[in-house]
Image (tube, rainbow, N blue to C red):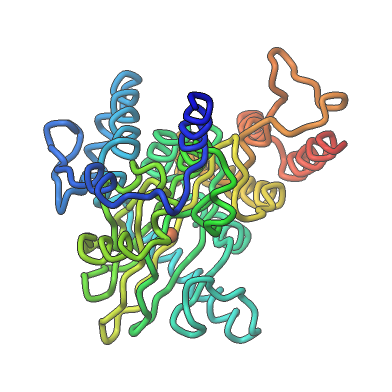
Amino acid sequence: MKSDNILKQRADRVWLTEAACDLDDFRAEVERTTQLSDYPHAAAVEKNVLIYEGASVLKAAASGEGRRAVLAEICEAFATGPGVVVLKRGFEDISVIDAASGIFDEIINEQHRTHTGGGDHFARPGANDRIWNSLEKHCLRNPENFAAYYGNALIALVSEAWLGPSYQMTAQVNRVNPGGAAQSAHRDYHLGFQTSAVIEQFPAHVHRLSPVLTLQGAVAHCDMPLESGPTLFLPYSQTYVPGYLALKRPEFRAYFDRNHIQLPLSKGDLVFFNPALFHAAGTNRSQDIKRVANLLQVSSAFGRAMETVNREKMSATLYPALKAMLADGRLSGAQAACAIASCAEGYSFPTNLDRDPPVGGLAPKTQAQLMQEALAGGWEAAAFTAALVAQSDKKLS
Ligand SMILES: [Fe+2]
């Protein structure tokens, strides 16, 4: 009967299932070759991955028009291109990374001493060390280093390229010790963290939505030769829409094992990838390299981030550091704006529109805007903190 046919076709369009995943369809998507000529701002293609030079990207993005072109190129590299980009020499001043590594070591040592720290959902205990919410811990422990670190214009640029403005930064440090085993191939937050039974309850458009709600990144805190196990990637695998379900099937996992690529990284390199890209951390086969990366998980203003972050407390802590660093020229206005974007809430909603009405537009003032206003007006730290508290209070129902 004709209506049966319509029902079946509609169900197949809306309900993706693990059973319907097809390796030949998948291969048709992923077996592509990246052409350097399609990405004029890139410096090279290595193992099908786009390699950018940090300084050249920033130079190209210096004008308004140039920035739009770079944002568009990186956006398409994540969407329809290989899905992963490496930015070589992502930090101009490597001492900023070394200082941050020292702060992370302190936090890890403290976690060991006090038996705190939440463990790792991917690894056996002791194989690696995690700092969950390293973003907030970093900011509260050393706001000046946080400002220099997240004042990074490339991190801001790539985040904006995929998510638009007002993104929500979160970060976790992962230190994989020698002998630390590989992860199994996976996709990331949101749908990537669910079982097939749950994933199959979401209509197909949500499978397409999940990857645009976050961006995954990593800052290499040490040199990572292949033996130390830098992340394994399968370029173009983000384009296979039922991929959240496919990864539960053995033939797809076997395909990943045979075809993944791995790139060595140097300290200060940045890697960003579409959260729907098939990937897994590699085995650390080295004798003595503790592979340390700060994993950036950037969320859309419209999504819910994985971690709870106390942005009010962070903003109050960061403000005096920004003020001092701007005053003595250690930070530019543009760098301060990038640091604020990683720290303060950049979006107006949700709020209580009775108490927090929009002024001169449709969106009430954001925490980030309040911070910019305070810096521009030279407010005392106490006055800014009081304004933060008042603003948060207005947003409550
Ligand atoms: Fe992951």
Q: Nearer the viewer, residue 246 or 107?
A: 246
Quarter placement of the C terminus: top right
Rendered view: 13 above or below 354: below
Ligand 1 sits in quadrant: bottom left
Q: Please state the horizontal and vertical placement of residue 248, each as a whole percent of the image.
A: 43, 61
Is residue 183 visible in the rendered image? The answer is: yes
Residue at the image point whose x is 52% and y is 54% from the top: 146
Rendered view: 170 above or below 129: above
**How many numbered circles are shown?**
0
Quadrant of residue 261 in the image? bottom left
Rendered view: 34 above or below 130: above
The residue furthest front is 1
Q: Please state the horizontal and vertical placement of residue 269, each as a whole percent of the image.
A: 29, 55
Horizontal side of 208 relative to 353 (left or right) equals left
Q: Nearer the viewer, residue 135 or 42?
A: 42
Residue at the image point whose x is 41% and y is 46% from the top: 242
Residue at the image point whose x is 24% and y is 48% from the top: 24
Q: Please state the horizontal and vertical placement of residue 116, each as a whole percent of the image.
A: 64, 79
Quadrant of residue 355 in the image? top right
Residue at the image point whose x is 56% and y is 61% from the top: 138
Is residue 337 visible in the rendered image? The answer is: no
Rendered view: 178 above or below 173: below
Horizontal side of 368 relative to 224 (left or right) equals right
Q: Please state the horizontal and vertical placement of residue 238, each as a whole percent of the image.
A: 35, 45
Q: Nearer the viewer, residue 18 or 96?
A: 18
